Image (cartoon, rainbow, N blue to C red):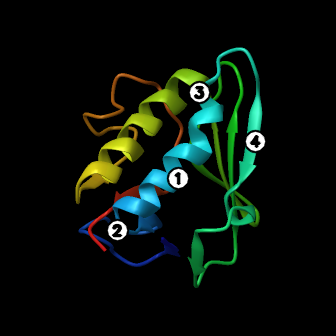
Amino acid sequence: MKIEYSLQTVFSFEGPNLCFLGNESDFKLLASSVVKLTDPFQDNQINLFDLDFPKPYEINKEILFSSKKNSNSLAIIENEKIVFELDSRYWERLFKYFVLMSWDKRTYYLNSYENYLSEFELEQDCYFVCSSEF
């Protein structure tokens, strides 16, 4: 999986964009890594680049995934980090999309106003694009 942060236009979204570009196997690994964030009884955190499979591409920021009750931060830029601090129910939704991308080549724009996440009140600093078509 290639992870890219860009200020350029990607898939018609003007920057900033955070893109996860991979194949079905990459998203299966990602789903298996984030499943622990769906536990509503425990707060967890993952530094994405501590995992073996993602490859940063021209990115100078850490990417942190964390679960914390009542949190709603989807791709918030904090200095040298991009932080996903979400309640476990939001992680459950993202987990499902990662699983769907592991079954077939798909592209999802996982943004706060898209149909996939629009019923949640999320804060977001950059677009989040995921594709298993690479």
Residue 16 vs residue 117: left or right? right
Residue 47 appears at what percent x and percent y?
Answer: 74, 55
Q: Say which label, 2 or 1, has the lower sequence index.
A: 2
The label nearer to you, 2 versus 1, is 1
Q: Earlier in the sequence, mark 3 or mark 2?
A: 2
The residues bearing labels 2 and 1 have C-alpha atoms spaced at a distance of 25 Å
Q: Which mark is residue 14?
A: 2
Asked if residue 72 shows in the view, the reply is no
Q: Is 104 on the left or on the right of 31, as rendered?
A: left
In the depicted structure, whether residue 110 falls above or below residue 52: above
**Circle 4 SS class:** strand
Specify which label sits upstream in the sequence, 1 or 4. 1
Compared with residue 11, is residue 30 higher up or lower down, i.e. above or below? above
Q: Quadrant of residue 120?
A: top left
> Can you tell which mark lies on residue 38?
3
**Residue denoted by label 1:** 30
Q: Residue furthest top?
A: 41
Mark 2 near mark 1, Cβ–Cβ under 8 Å?
no
Q: CA distance from mark 4 to mark 3?
A: 11 Å
C-alpha gap between disc 1 and disc 3: 13 Å
Answer with mark 4 or mark 3, whichever residue precedes in sequence.
Answer: 3
Residue type marked 4: Gln
Residue 132 lies left or right of residue 64; in this view the side is left
Residue type, mark 2 in image: Glu
Which class describes the residues within 10 Å of circle 1: few (<14), some (14-19), or many (20+)? many
| Residue drawn 64% across the image and 33% down it | 37
